[in-house]
Image (cartoon, rainbow, N blue to C red):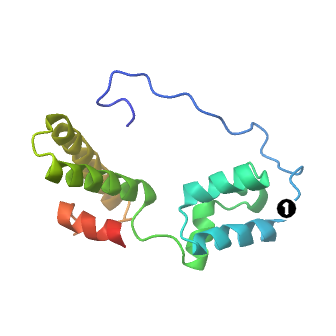
Amino acid sequence: MARMYARRRGKSGSHKPLLRTTAWVGYTPKEVEELVIKYAKEGHSSAKIGIILRDQYGIPSVKGITNKTISDIMKEHGYYPSIPEDLLNLLKKAVNIANHLEKMKKDKHAKHALELVESKIKRLVKYYQRAKKLPKTWKYDLERAKLIVKQ
């Protein structure tokens, strides 16, 4: 969804290594799982855990070592959030823009940005309801989003 409302071409970023084997990493699958659990207990998201493991421990791919994704490991041990991570990030963004709009009522650019973020949220909710990751009764509401983000 990066280019839906903008005329920019998006960002170029780093790419995963082509080799699926990570035999050169000095960690066993059990050690990597323990690291994932440790950072999940601290409240980090799965994306943040992946960045920490890459930058601090030199682990390029958790799946290459453990044959499980970070999300799978978090789900096994009960640390995965009930709302998907990308939806939660969009909810945080909407709450921040709404808080800004409460202070600056005439900011038309922020009002338009809030409309765009809310449409992305609604579209993502439809997808997660089809994929059965959210219940069919789940609806987006700004007040409810504020409560979810506070948790």
Instruction: Determine the image quadrant of residue 9.
Output: top left
Q: Residue at x 37, y 29 (%)?
A: 3
Q: Quadrant of residue 67?
A: bottom right
Tell whether 23 sits left or right of 78: right
Q: Quadrant of residue 142?
A: bottom left
Q: Nearer the viewer, residue 4 or 56?
A: 56
Q: Which residue extends farthest bottom?
A: 78
Q: Number of labelled discs?
A: 1
Where residue 124 sits: x, y (%)? 32, 51
Position of residue 85 relative to residue 111, above or below, is below
Q: Nearer the viewer, residue 57 or 102?
A: 102
Q: Name the element at disc 1.
A: loop
Q: Does the image show residue 136?
A: no
Q: Which residue is mark 1?
A: 27
| Rendered residue at 26%/65% (across/down) | 146
In the image, taking residue 88 as reference, residue 14 lies left or right, namely: right
Relative image position of residue 27 (x, y in whole percent): 85, 61
In the rendered image, the quadrant that contains the C terminus is bottom left
Is any part of residue 16 visible from this angle? yes
Which residue lies at the image location 31% right of the left edge and 56% below the top edge?
91
In the image, residue 110 lies at what x, y percent? 21, 40
Q: Residue most toward the left?
A: 106
Q: Residues within 10 Å of mark 1 (few under 14, many from 20)?
A: some
Q: Amino acid type of disc 1?
A: Tyr
Q: Locate residue 43, reporting x and y percent.
A: 53, 70
